[in-house]
Image (cartoon, grey):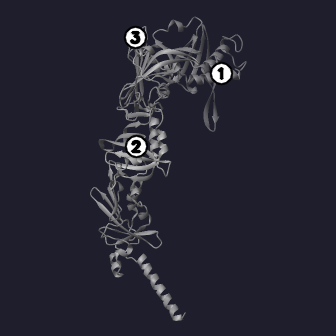
Amino acid sequence: MKQGSTWLIISLAVVLGVFVFWIDRTPMKTAAAKGESLYPDWDPAKIVTVDFYYTPDKWISAAKINGHWNLTTPIKYPANEAAIERIIASVKNLTTDGHISKEELDKNKRTIEEYGIKTDTQFQRLTLRGKNSMTEFHLGNKTVGEDEVFFKVTGKEEIYLAGAGFLDQIPKDENGWRDSHVFHPYRHQVEKISFKGPAPYGFELARNAVNPDRWDILSPTPSRADVKKVQDLFNEFSQWNVEKYVGDDLSKKMLDYGLDMPQAQISFQYKDENDPVQKNTVIQFGNIDITHTNLAYIGLVTDMNTNVVLAQGEFLRNLMKPWQNFRCMKVWDVRTNDVQSVLFNSFPESIQGNNAFQLEKKEDTGTWVAMGLSEDTLSGMETYPADPKVVGWILQQLTETEVIEVTKEVVSDFSEYGLDKPFQRIVTTGTRGDQQQVDFGVVVTNEDPVEQKVYIRCRETGGSTLQNSVAEVSEKDAMKFPTEAFQLYLRDILKFSTNDFRKMTFRLGNRERVVSREKKRTKNVNGEKVDEFSYKIEGYDDTKEPIPDEVIFLMSELAYRLGELRADSWIYMGNEVPAEFEVKEAARSLLVEYKANGKNVEKEILFADIKVDRMPIGIVKMNGKMWVFKFPPATYEYYADLLGLLMGREGLGKK
């Protein structure tokens, strides 16, 4: 090759390289400050419609309707909301950095078409509309490095550059704009679910009319539904995805797809945000696809459109289960923070009326009170501040108590189960006014295994119908709730710190011994004066023989435990102590003296000779009444050990 030809080829290559460089990225002059945001005040929430034209004959339109994106033309279908939201949000990242001004285009005799931008036709055009605005982008070619894309904004003469992702995020075809779920229940406020499958499978569920957070089973047998089981069903649907979009006109090939007589179908009735109109989506299960036997034709029928898709056919197994799987096995289907009041009724044979009291939460303070509702009870018509720990226990028991089994699904005569005249009724009222009533009937004994059970009937307000089934709970669960308002009263009997303890007097018949905590001396510790205390036993000379350490420990531990003394439960409250709890001549008592609010306070505890549920019984006078209670066994052991040492003939001796 001649040297001249070589230089000619080299020169042409240089010229071509320069030409490509200018076509790919012409040097720019700023029409606006370099790097400024194109849309500094961009608010994605204001966009209500999105249109994208691939070509003049191929486009997609989506609109935000009642809080959710839907494809509106040329196909009607729930939209891929994540994709649309990403497209809208990405506009915020567009800047003027690297733009080509109109002057630069004219100077270099370039046209926008050379950058793949076509403004005179519907080609790669993205239009975003708000209620009073429109923003339109004409997307062009990518740069040679394919890391950026040219675009133009309608109304502006410049050409801009964006990251290639601005174009790549646009779905490749119309189907990419569709929601990938067969049905997405969390897009809607589902009110009712109806499933019809091969016998015996089928059920109908509906939201509770008063408390929409709860669900009821309407058929085959009315009962409460387990909210978690309904949520599990929703979760299963939210993970069931379309494998292929088949068509958007179900009426054409119903027979081919097996949708003229579907194997099964499930319908969802729902409302959308800010739209009171009831809508309906029916999902039909058709034939298995002959080329992909794991897929089945699924028909989607709504009020506005019909569609056919292919999806995993095995999903039908999630629905082919006994309707009883949805039954709520909780006796009360409540949450602790949702209970506003609990009404307790008991109907003993000896009283014509009923023993009733109500546990109620005060809205202004958030505290609870127990209100007596019957003159024929120990509590009378009095109102008692309720112990927070006791209230917490009751609420927890209400949420946890479960049915052992359902005795009979549909009952017309409840007298056989003692539920025509229940011995106990407990009614909860939620913050939305929804009530759940549970009646307790006859106690029955199982032989194998041996156990006592109680028949119950659950009813509620807000359900489509009353529950007419009878179930069983353990006798322990049936009998564990209080029967009187006073039993919920504050259970703190003594409340003081060890430093506030003064003395305790042990009495046994006509004898007594006094244990006191007295100041021993003042020591200087790190420049501060610290008082030291010691325990003394009145009448005992500890200068001759010190009190043994194990006795000091007993006195110190008992004083500490008495400072936190709580009744395990209240058994009785009245003006006089009943005969069965009467303190005899040789009765034991403990008089405790301590300091509270700067004053010396004395409180005496009497001890009965009997035990209830194997627990010692204490008696204390409060608010002008005698209160009988179960004394904490561990604290009683310290008291009994110290009493034996103080009053016995051995050990320390006696006064």
Q: Position of residue 408 (x, y in %)?
A: 46, 21
Query: As rendered, which of 373 and 175 lies closer to the eye?
Result: 175
Query: As rendered, which of 450 and 580 lies closer to the eye?
Result: 450
- Under mark 3, the amino acid is Asp
**Residue carrying label 1:** 554
Calculate the distance from the C-alpha at mark 2 to the C-alpha at mark 1: 76 Å
Q: Position of residue 323 (x, y in %)?
A: 45, 32
User: Residue 376, labelled with which disc?
Assistant: 3
Q: Is residue 561 left or right of residue 62?
A: right
- Under mark 2, the amino acid is Gln
Q: Is residue 613 left or right of residue 43?
A: right
Instruction: Give the secondary structure at mark 3.
Output: loop
Q: Residues within 10 Å of mark 3 (few under 14, many from 20)?
A: some
Instruction: Give the secondary structure at mark 1.
Output: helix
Q: Is residue 81 above or below residue 390?
A: below
User: Residue 284, labelled with which disc?
Assistant: 2
Q: Nearer the viewer, mark 2 or mark 1?
A: 2
**Residue 57 appears in which quarter of the rendering?**
bottom left
Q: Earlier in the sequence, mark 3 or mark 1?
A: 3
- Under mark 1, the amino acid is Leu
Q: Is residue 148 above or below residue 578?
A: below
Instruction: Give the secondary structure at mark 2.
Output: strand
Q: Is residue 627 above or below residue 338?
A: above
Does residue 25 appear anywhere in the picture? no
Q: Nearer the viewer, mark 3 or mark 1?
A: 3
User: Residue 577, labelled with which disc?
Assistant: none
Q: Earlier in the sequence, mark 2 or mark 1?
A: 2
Calculate the distance from the C-alpha at mark 3 to the C-alpha at mark 2: 61 Å
Q: Position of residue 244 (x, y in %)?
A: 44, 53
Calculate the distance from the C-alpha at mark 3 to the C-alpha at mark 1: 44 Å
